[in-house]
Amino acid sequence: MTVAMTPTASRLAPEQFLERFGRYFNRGRIDAIANLGFLFVEGRAEGVYFEDSQGRRFLDMWCMGGTFNLGHRNPAVVQAAQAGLAEEDFGSLFFFSEAKGLLAEKLAQCTPGRLETTHPVVTGGEAIDLAVKLARGSTRRTAILHADQAYHGCTGFALSMMARGEMRDFAEPLIPDFHEIRYGDAGDLAAKISDRTAAVVLEAVRTDADMAVPPPQYFAEVRRLCDATGAKLIIDEVVCGMGRLGTLWGCQYWDVEPDMLVTGKGFSGGVFPMSAVVTRPECLDFFAESPYRTISSYAWSNVGARVTRAALEETERLLPRLAALGDGIEADLRTLQARYRGALRGVRRAGMMFALDFADAATGMAFLGLMFSLGVLVVASSQRLEIVKIYPPLILEKEHVAEFTEKMETALKSLGS
Ligand SMILES: Cc1ncc(COP(=O)(O)O)c(C=O)c1O
């Protein structure tokens, strides 16, 4: 099944776009992107490719952090959106519907263990905020432990865990009683967790800063320490979930069951903004006193619920192919690393997530620019520009892997290593 390309995609070149619309956007942001050489006006998008307004085609090996895990405008997801729009809308936050029921039931079935109760919200940051609030409400404690160099979004509680100074300093003072732990260091958590700790918030792999993969026993120890102190374990699956680590959820990669699982990005199927917190039932017991402690107008969308259920089913359908797909990509990356080790110092992998460790930030950025000019989108870690992240679409076929490898070799050659 194919989905027709949208006929209204922009045809404006970047200069024309800026002349007409530039003043309506944050100028600093436009200039920063232009200075990096990435000024881009979006055109059509389909499958593993997206185009700019002039029809230049790009292989999407970033997937906007996982939002496009299923490719752009995945037919099954678009069909669910179209069917939903033909009959329903957001619905009401006070009412129930079959679409909402089916999504909640699906999530209870496809998440591990006792994760059973779903709270849909719109963005990942909102979902993180909600999970932290639920932890504080259900434990009646306030202290939150989170990873150093973490990124969980730009909303209130999420921002209070923000490592990037430029994104948080101007908004200080933030919410108190948030404390850093060293990611992957169970000893550091053991030293800091206590009966004051409401929650420990972690990603299955620390994605934003450096793609740090913790030691194999880390999450078992984190779970044990949370159980021993009564703290809630919140796993942020906004990037690591929805198949990114080769398992449906990142917590399954480590065989750990959190008290709350936070999902977003790919949960939207790339077409309708949806995020959610899935919790163990007891995290919500305190709602009995007042059922409307937290509400949101656009949560529980009927159309979104249909889209997300289709995205979950599609992701599950793709899971069996991911180990072989990931092995193929890894083999190619390692071959290139052996050939161009002067520039490319290392290759790391967790499931369908890859990191390239370049010699320095300048080499990493030069590589990004070369790949962009060759029609491939990859990005650098926000806090370490020498680390390039690759999040391939889960629908990638052999010919796309070959295209990526060939273009990567061309870029590495021009780096002169
Ligand atoms: C790990 C992680 N958590 C949470 C978020 C926040 O999601 P959103 O941008 O939808 O608010 C992000 C966004 O990039 C993220 O990478």
Image (cartoon, grey):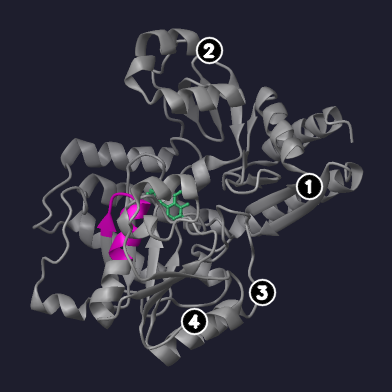
Residue at the spot 10% in from the left edge and 70% down from the top edge: 291
Sooner in the amino-acid sequence: mark 2 or mark 3:
2
Q: Tell me the CA gap for discs 3 and 1.
A: 23 Å
Q: Tell us which disc is closer to us: 1 or 4.
A: 4
Q: Could you tell me the amino acid type at mark 4? A: Lys
Q: Tell us which disc is closer to us: 4 or 2.
A: 4
Binning the other alpha carbons within 10 Å of mark 2 as few (below 14), some (14 to 19) or many (20 upward) gives some
Residue at the spot 15% in from the left edge and 56% down from the top edge: 97
Left or right of 277, for residue 284: left
| Membership of 73 in magenta stretch | no
Q: Could you tell me the amino acid type at mark 2? A: Gln
Image quarter for residue 20? top left
Helix, strand or loop at label 2? It is loop
Residue identified by numbered label 3: 215
Query: Percent x, y for residue 262?
Result: 38, 63
Q: Could you tell me the amino acid type at mark 1? A: Leu
Image quarter hosting the C terminus: top right
Q: Nearer the viewer, residue 375 or 19?
A: 19
Left or right of 234, for residue 207: right
Residue identified by numbered label 2: 54
Sooner in the amino-acid sequence: mark 4 or mark 2:
2
Query: Percent x, y for residue 284?
Result: 22, 76
Q: Is residue 395 above or below residue 276?
A: above
Residue identified by numbered label 1: 333
Magenta residues, as a range? Answer: 120-131
